[in-house]
Image (cartoon, rainbow, N blue to C red):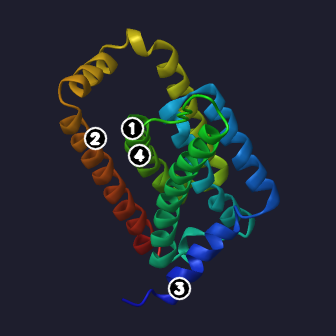
């Protein structure tokens, strides 16, 4: 199946916004910080933050919602998923390299943390992407800050929150069911998010 040329061009431009020296250094620094801090599923903040950077380019180049097309929307969502994949693969490679030079096994991020990261990423990015499309980067970034603050609070008070305990109990009793439900929920949110963003384009034509 031949990939549409407009889609490939849009995807290339999105990657172009993060493949520069400053962004790669920032990516590496954030990766090391989260790895050393052993923050597990909070790794989702790395691909999420970088997935939103192209919106800053759109604002800078004055690319309005009326100038965007369905291929740009589709490319932005695929771009976000590819960033998630890059972070997951990088964590595995880093873990293996670290274990080669260590007397003990080094596990930067567990399988359960990766699954949780995917679920959270699909859910949060699914919520934020339409907001960024609608409001732009300058206004949309405040919603990202709210997400960061919320997860910081949840990380501190996770043992005191009833719904966190319920989720943990379900995961302990039937981890496969919890994973399936979580991935299904995140996937549905992401698909609905794409449809909403697509509607923004068609309504402004």
Residue 79: give x, y in percent of width and height: 52, 64
Q: Are marks 3 and 1 in contact (CB under 8 Å)?
A: no
State the residue at coordinates (81%, 59%): 21
Relative horizontal placement of residue 16, taking residue 69 as reference (left or right): right
The numbered mark at residue 118 is 4
74 relative to 136, above or below: below
Mark 4 residue element: helix
Distance from disc 4 to disc 3, alpha carbons, whole Å, reads: 28 Å
Residue located beneath label 2 in the image: 182
98 relative to 2, above or below: above
- Viewer-nearest of discs 2 and 3: 2
Relative horizontal placement of residue 187, taking residue 197 as reference (left or right): left
Residue 88: give x, y in percent of width and height: 51, 49
Residue 105: give x, y in percent of width and height: 54, 32
Residue located beneath label 3 in the image: 6
Quarter of the image that includes the N terminus: bottom left
State the residue at coordinates (64%, 62%): 54
Q: Quick one: label 2, few (<14), some, or many (20+) residues within 10 Å?
A: some
- Viewer-nearest of discs 4 and 3: 4
Q: Earlier in the sequence, mark 2 or mark 1?
A: 1
Q: Are marks 2 and 1 in contact (CB under 8 Å)?
A: yes
Residue located beneath label 1 in the image: 116
Distance from disc 3 to disc 1, alpha carbons, whole Å, reads: 33 Å
Q: Nearer the viewer, residue 173 or 75?
A: 173
Residue 133: give x, y in percent of width and height: 53, 59
Distance from disc 2 to disc 1, alpha carbons, whole Å, reads: 8 Å
Q: Nearer the viewer, residue 171 or 198?
A: 171
| Residue, far right | 21
55 relative to 61, above or below: above
């Amino acid at each position: 199946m031949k990939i549409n040329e407009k889609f490939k061009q849009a995807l290339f431009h999105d990657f172009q916004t993060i493949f520069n020296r400053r962004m790669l250094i920032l990516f590496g620094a954030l990766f090391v910080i989260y790895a050393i801090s052993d923050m597990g599923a909070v790794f989702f903040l790395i691909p999420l933050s970088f997935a939103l950077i192209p919106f800053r380019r759109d604002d800078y180049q004055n690319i309005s919602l009326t100038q965007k097309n369905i291929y740009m929307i589709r490319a932005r969502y695929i771009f976000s998923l590819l960033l998630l994949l890059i972070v997951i693969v990088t964590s595995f490679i880093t873990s293996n390299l670290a274990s080669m030079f260590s007397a003990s096994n080094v596990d930067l991020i567990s399988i359960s943390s990766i699954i949780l990261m995917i679920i959270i990423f699909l859910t949060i990015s699914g919520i934020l992407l339409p907001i960024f499309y609608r409001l732009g980067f300058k206004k949309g970034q405040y919603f990202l800050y709210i997400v960061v603050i919320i997860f910081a609070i949840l990380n501190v008070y996770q043992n005191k929150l009833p719904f966190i305990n319920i989720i943990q109990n379900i995961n302990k009793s039937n981890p496969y069911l919890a994973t399936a439900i979580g991935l299904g929920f995140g996937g549905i949110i992401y698909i609905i998010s794409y449809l909403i963003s697509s509607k923004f384009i068609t309504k402004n034509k």
